[in-house]
Amino acid sequence: MELIKLFKVMLAKKEGELMDNKDKYELGVIKLTETGEIVSKLEEELKIFSVEVEFKKKSADEQAEVVGGEKIKVEAQNAIAEVEAKKCF
């Protein structure tokens, strides 16, 4: 009789441990699923942002070329102005 009582106590304890482990496992699966969904959304956003960044980079490079061309023109005009200024003195 004492052995049966001890067995029931041990069984209840193991059952409680198994239920706790099952709950932890289920919560972990839920968290992994949620994280997977978040990562999927972030990957989609990253694709969109990378296209936007590439467009803006291309636009910035074009602007840099224009500014570089204008800088060359200004430097040429500045050189001409310096020659004219030296003639005046």
Image (cartoon, rainbow, N blue to C red):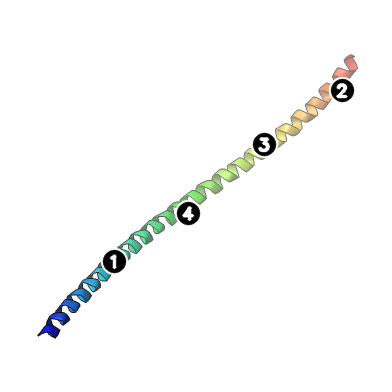
Of the numbered discs 3 and 2, the one sitting upstream in the chain is 3
Q: Report the residue marked by disc 4.
A: 47
At label 1, counting other C-alpha atoms closer than 10 Å, the crowd grade (few under 14, some 14-19, many 20 or more) is few
Q: Report the residue marked by disc 1.
A: 24
Three-letter amino acid code at disc 2? Val
Three-letter amino acid code at disc 3? Val
Q: Could you say which is closer to the camera, residue 87 or residue 7?
A: 7
Most extreme residue toward the top is 89
Give the secondary structure at mark 4.
helix
x, y percent for residue 55 = 55, 46
Give the secondary structure at mark 1.
helix
Of the numbered discs 1 and 4, the one sitting upstream in the chain is 1
Q: Is residue 40 left or right of residue 65?
A: left
Q: Report the residue marked by disc 3.
A: 66
x, y percent for residue 19 = 22, 71
Question: Do the numbered discs 1 and 3 sit on residues whose CB atoms are within 8 Å?
Answer: no
Q: Is residue 53 left or right of residue 4?
A: right
User: Looking at the figure, which quarter contains the N terminus?
Assistant: bottom left
Question: Do the numbered discs 3 and 2 sit on residues whose CB atoms are within 8 Å?
Answer: no
At label 3, counting other C-alpha atoms closer than 10 Å, the crowd grade (few under 14, some 14-19, many 20 or more) is few
Taking the spot 35% from the left edge, 63% from the top edge, the residue there is: 32
x, y percent for residue 86 = 88, 19
